[in-house]
Amino acid sequence: MNFDIDEEQRNFAEHARDFFSEQAGPGTARRLLDEAGDPAPGPRVLAELGFSSLTIPEIAGGVGAELLNMALVAEQAGRQLAGPSLATAARVAVLLEGDEGRLRDVSEGRTVIAVVDGSPAGSSPSMDALSATHFLALDGEDLLLGEGRVSPGEPIDATRGLGFVELTSSEVVCRDARERWERARQVACVVLAAEGLGAADRVVELGIEHARSRETFGRPIGAYQAVKHRLVDDWVAVNQLRSLVWWAAWAADHAPEQLPLAASAAKAYCATTFETACETLIHVLGGIGFTWEHDAHLYWRRAKVDRLLLGDESEHLAAVALQSISAATRAVSGETGTTEVVPV
Amino acid sequence: MDFDDTPDQARLRDAVRQFLVDHDSELAHGDGAYLEEPGTDRVEGLRRTQAILFDAGLIGLTWPKDYGGGGGTNAQQAVVNEELHRARVAGPIGHVGLGMCGPTVLGHGSEDQKQRYIRRLLRADDLWCQLFSEPGSGSDLAALRTKAVRHDDGWHIQGQKVWTTLAQHSRYGILLARTNPEAQKHRGLTMFVVDMESPGVTVRPLRQMNGHQSFNEVFLDDVVIDDSERLGDVDDGWRVALTTLMSERMAVGGGGGELGVRSDALVAHAASRLPQLSDDRRRLTIEALGRVLVESLAARYTGYRLQTSVERGGRPGPEASAGKLTAVRVAHATADLGQRLLGDEAVLARSVEGDWRWATSQASTPGIALAGGADEILRNILGERVLGLPPDSARVAPRPTPPSESR
């Protein structure tokens, strides 16, 4: 067993880290709350650098990398609250599998595609809709691609580009697309969890920095166990989240039968970890953490929104439980020759 | 990144699997570490199990060949552990020796000590215990008061230890005692190997809240230890103890192993109980099960990452303490959900069908949260040594109270 990333991946992540610290950051997230616009670095720059086409095959103009590499980049994007989400990019790459022409348009930045959740005639708030030129949607069992009308709602986190989408024109790009739709959503969950991982990691780092230097009653507040232990618990959770994200991303390419379980585990664990880390940060910062000027609330906004996108925690926890039960039941019936299904 | 076996590992896995099938009836089985049916005392059966596994080369795989080990890799031991787990083989009775005392003797003992002790320890011919905690020093281990005074015939030990797991079955123990009461508290300690059959050693088992008697009080009344049984230098016992403590935290949960009832047992239990629940209850239970399983997966895969770094020759650092924190939390949640799944019978220590595992585990996990570093101590270690947060100045005391003034 070798459960670690390699040297090349480490360098790649380092490169992505530099890029996102220069090209994105909480400043943009704050500005977008007051004025409409594209998140940073924006869809075109992400396409130009090949980040959004990482999992698109080379033959279609992409990089042809594994999802794990996408997750490593997404972690760095998450640290800086970058947008649009690489989860959308990874999802589109799965949905358009085999469609070289359309994937090439995406790779080369000619089209910017978002995925519509809910009905194509009037969607639920869907990620990255505001900066998209085209939309993918599931209509029954058919996968549609088309243009649409987007109405933004008032955002909690403006970097997610959430909007209600109504398709105005569409064509069927794939029939019997349910399985592919589900798999694309699982892949997106992994990447969204990777972005949450990077953001949560940054949040814990900010809390630690503050707790080291801020003094009260003559001691740094990080000396108090009540503060120290909260930060430690968050740090432990972030480290565990990293394990789940890596496992899930690896499974997507190497053990696809594990992907549904692993993706749900990562997504559910991210929901709590990221949110708790943000709440700790604001609390540890004290009054400063409650101000508009401090970055803390921008991460908190992301956490509050991401935990609900692509399925909330309850949905994913139930998925983990039911898949584990059915795997165990299959293993047992395989040995005894009987089939037993747990009614739920 | 790669979870697959190498061809060698696959061969090893097949061989181990076959061995465990062939010898199934000779081995003791169980549903989880530190989990025994109330009232059972199957020490002899567990010792036999460990001996059979050792003779087959499945215990001490990574330990040096010179002392009876297999000279193998951590990766091989991980394969063996997975197969032992899969076959529900009970954890080794000599876990204190394997996890803590053995590594300490290997790290700091003389050649003669290693030759005499290690092979018998691996085979559970001798069980070992760890004589660290005292009535007046648990979390603040370095404040311990048991003293060792040097005479012509060796070191004379006077004092009392407590919470000593397996002491009543142990032939040997590693003992941390104060050799210099004048020095700063961490600097006046020395580590020894003590023969538990020596005159002056009295062991009194303590009954725990789970009904078992796995730990003990140990009274040391002028026990004489030859200087050749010292581990490490005089007054350098704290450094030796750190080897033990880090090994302990790695052994208990650090490698992604599970404590208490195994999560696959919980899944099987849930599968059989869920159809009997009402619809609303079932929905809530499924979500609760998901939460336990996600925590368990997170701990497991984090353990795999730690294993990978150890396989590459890294030493388990202070971050291994995190593994124990999370393993305890998972054990707690597993026991709680397992018990609640028993429905009306969850108020009983044993269900009508005879299921005692969850009630026993729920009464055992509070102890695991304390043993080998209480949760708060582990959080301090992580906070200060990994995260770089400042120490709590109230905890930095200059010197312990001299033993003479303390009674």
Image: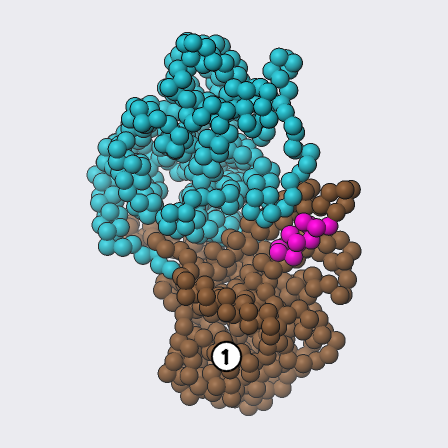
Chain colours: A brown, B cyan
Magenta span has A212?
yes
- Residue B121 lies in what quarter of the image? top left
Please name the residue shown 59% across and 77% down the image: A41
Please name the residue shown 60% across and 47% down the image: B388
Give x and y (percent) for residue A279: 68, 55
Q: Chain of mark 1?
A: A
Figure check: B204 above or below A260? above
Q: Quadrant of the C terminus of chain B?
A: top right
Give x and y (percent) for residue B302: 46, 51
Q: Main secondary structure of the magenta part?
A: helix
Give x and y (percent) for residue A236: 55, 49
Residue type (three-letter) at the residue carrying disc 1: Leu
Span highlighted in magenta in the image: A204-214
- Residue A257 lies in what quarter of the image? bottom left
Residue B120 at least partly seen: no
Magenta span has A29?
no
Secondary structure of the residue carrying numbered label 1: loop
**Which is more toward the observer, A38 or B244?**
B244
Residue A72 at least partly seen: yes
**Which is more toward the observer, A64 or A217?**
A217
Mark 1, residue position: A49
Q: Residue furthest bottom?
A: A169
Q: Quadrant of the N terminus of chain B?
A: bottom left
Q: Is residue A107 left or right of residue A275?
A: left
